[in-house]
Amino acid sequence: MSRIHIPDGSPFGPDNLPYGVFSAEGGSRRVGVRVGDTVADLSLLLDDPVFAAPTLNPFMAQGPRRWAEARVRLRAAVEGTVPKHALHPLREVRMHLPFEVGDYVDFYASEHHAANLGRLFRPGQEPLAPNWKHLPVGYHGRSGTVVVSGTGVVRPCGQRKAPDEAAPTYGPSRRLDIEAELGFVVGAGTALGERIDVDDFAEHVFGAVLVNDWSARDLQAWEYVPLGPFLGKSFATSVSPWVVPLAALEHARVPLPGQVPAPLPYLRGGEDWGLDVDLAVEWNGEQVSRPPYREMYWSPAQMLAHMTVNGASTRTGDLFASGTISGPAKHQRGAFIELTWGGTEPVTVKGEERTFLLDGDEVTITATAPGPDGARIGFGEVTATILPPR
Amino acid sequence: MSRIHIPDGSPFGPDNLPYGVFSAEGGSRRVGVRVGDTVADLSLLLDDPVFAAPTLNPFMAQGPRRWAEARVRLRAAVEGTVPKHALHPLREVRMHLPFEVGDYVDFYASEHHAANLGRLFRPGQEPLAPNWKHLPVGYHGRSGTVVVSGTGVVRPCGQRKAPDEAAPTYGPSRRLDIEAELGFVVGAGTALGERIDVDDFAEHVFGAVLVNDWSARDLQAWEYVPLGPFLGKSFATSVSPWVVPLAALEHARVPLPGQVPAPLPYLRGGEDWGLDVDLAVEWNGEQVSRPPYREMYWSPAQMLAHMTVNGASTRTGDLFASGTISGPAKHQRGAFIELTWGGTEPVTVKGEERTFLLDGDEVTITATAPGPDGARIGFGEVTATILPPR
């Protein structure tokens, strides 16, 4: 038996305890918890076969009472002594997609981002559509191409047409971009015809991950009228390997910045699910942006209530993401198209002027949130390298 | 042992042999084939445990060589004598969703439909967006709410705002509609970064189903700018229980009506996957429309090539649908919003003037296609009743 070493100031202390799926050399996939820089095998730590599954889905499907109970036992276990063979140094394990994704929905919940994109995609028109302040605008993405951090992203090919070109051409995207987002994972689903009340958010959502919703802006601009983004997004969406339980974000809860006009009653309440999560975007190792989640207009509780108000069912593993997180300041923008204003205002990265992504570029998004007593809650990172087109 | 009785002129003769998932009283779900009005249990007929699965996915994942081989054996089996206990009268079994849906994509491939919707949703503008004749426009739908024929459809609630209203209101949809479509089921998937050539359609697609893509037009009209349809569609999508193998549609293949301008090279070829499938829409038992699939502008081979040209992976069970099938004539329109021109030109159904769906209405879509020697290939039906809002 041994105690788990937690480095001073680690954002993976006993107040966090995020869940992931790992494999150690030669072993099968199983559920682990990150404590400091150690991964503990939960099937051994808590002696429960639900954690020997290759995804978090069976555990998440057990529901909120069980999540709370496991968290209490887990905290006691990591603060005591644990069997040595249950522990693996983080650098020696491989992390996998932590859950099997049901449906993937992407929202558009940052007013700053939506207004910036409106100006860039529809110059001369009102930047926000008339519906934007009445409902959290969203759409379905491709769940089959959600990949775990570390998976290479092949530059997509497709049709693109610049405004000054007469006809579209085919080829690799020339405006490959990121979107820094927070994603929420449904644990306890609902049947067809039911809806999830805005106040029942924590009964259904298991936790949160970082999301990089890679975007080929040239493909997107040409294809998206009238049915929305499709191939400009569906080639890859990266998520961080650690799912931070909602319970670990209690100290991060803040009021929303304010909603005018007041939303319809089914979207009221749930306003205290604003979250003070601080993101950072690194481009080839240089920090280029600090998107603040607390600036988001719509809360994730409102997103979930809206997504199910028509009676759409939810499943364990459904993922819904916030949309790009952008604050009011330029250095708070969570997409390069905004940061470089459509490529017209390059940023300096490692001494070079840059606009969109080049092959070989690496983008890493990290985040932390306040925990109790000045501690920080870490999300880890979502990172990937751009691979050349095939 | 006994011979299977096939009524004269049945569209479920030995040239069709569609696959479905059924359960007989007290039994588990398993794969069956429809022959006449009989369902034959395939795990018994072909003595293969892959057909004892509760979905078609394990069989579909085996790939096209195996599909062809099973079809040869199946045809020989149903034309000979079979064990009596493998046979069930169709009326005595319950049909289930035939496959576990991976991603669900809905296209917009009928020029007549797209132009009609453009006129209705964006009056005074060009009905077709500039991209429409360059690529098959599509978007992702909600795979978790794909349901089998016979499942009741609860009228969805949500936000709607008529053009003359100052603000949106919440309530049940007042413009509930159908979309008569054909859906294609991916059997053999592809890895991330690969693309499916337009000529490799039959290597990957297992078969076709009828689809009713229920649409709440008032929710859709208010929400869909700029990210596309969301809650106006995600409450339910119904599919027929029998998957007609692609091999059964060989005699239905026809050239496309013609594409001007010529599409980019990656969308050329595959034009001979136009399909002469004749649909019929019944509203409370009265036929109101006869949508002709042969009028579709884009072929399903082009849809699949486009969907994967950016390197998006595909999975066994992915479903992509054609979008509403509408011909040039009024009685060939596959959605009520077109048939009644936005509700301004009611149709007579059972002696009553009708525009959109009322609670208790039943809609049934059927289809047949040419087989060899004058035979018809039947798709069966996709039917559902509208239930009151909750």
Image: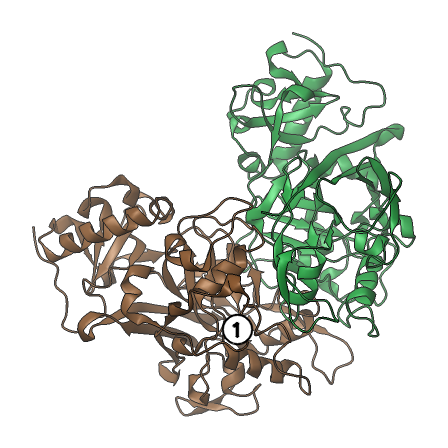
Chain colours: A green, B brown
Q: Residues within 10 Å of mark 1 (few under 14, many from 20)?
A: few
- Nearer to the camera, B382 or A191: B382
Q: Chain of mark 1?
A: B
What residue type is disc 1 on? Ala
Is A263 situated above or below B374?
above
Name which residue lies at 72% across and 67% down.
A162
Q: Looking at the rendering, in which quadrant would you find the C terminus of chain B?
A: bottom right
Residue at (33%, 57%) from the top-left corner?
A: B95
Picture residue at 63% right of the left edge, 57% below the top: A171
Give the residue at x 52% y 61%. B266
Q: Position of residue A328 (x, y in %)?
A: 90, 55
Q: Secondary structure at mark 1?
A: loop
Q: Quadrant of residue B127?
A: bottom right
Task: Work out whether residue A69 can be spotted.
Answer: no
Residue ID for mark 1: B262
- Residue A7 is drawn in which quadrant? top right
- Residue B158 visible here: yes
Q: Is residue B161 left or right of residue B246?
A: right
Please tell me whether residue B379 is drawn above or below residue B342 in the rendered image.
above
Nearest to the observer: residue B365 or residue B11: B11
Residue B318 at x, y = what percent?
46, 53
Answer above or below: position of B14 versus B164: above
Residue B142 on image: x %, y %: 55, 58
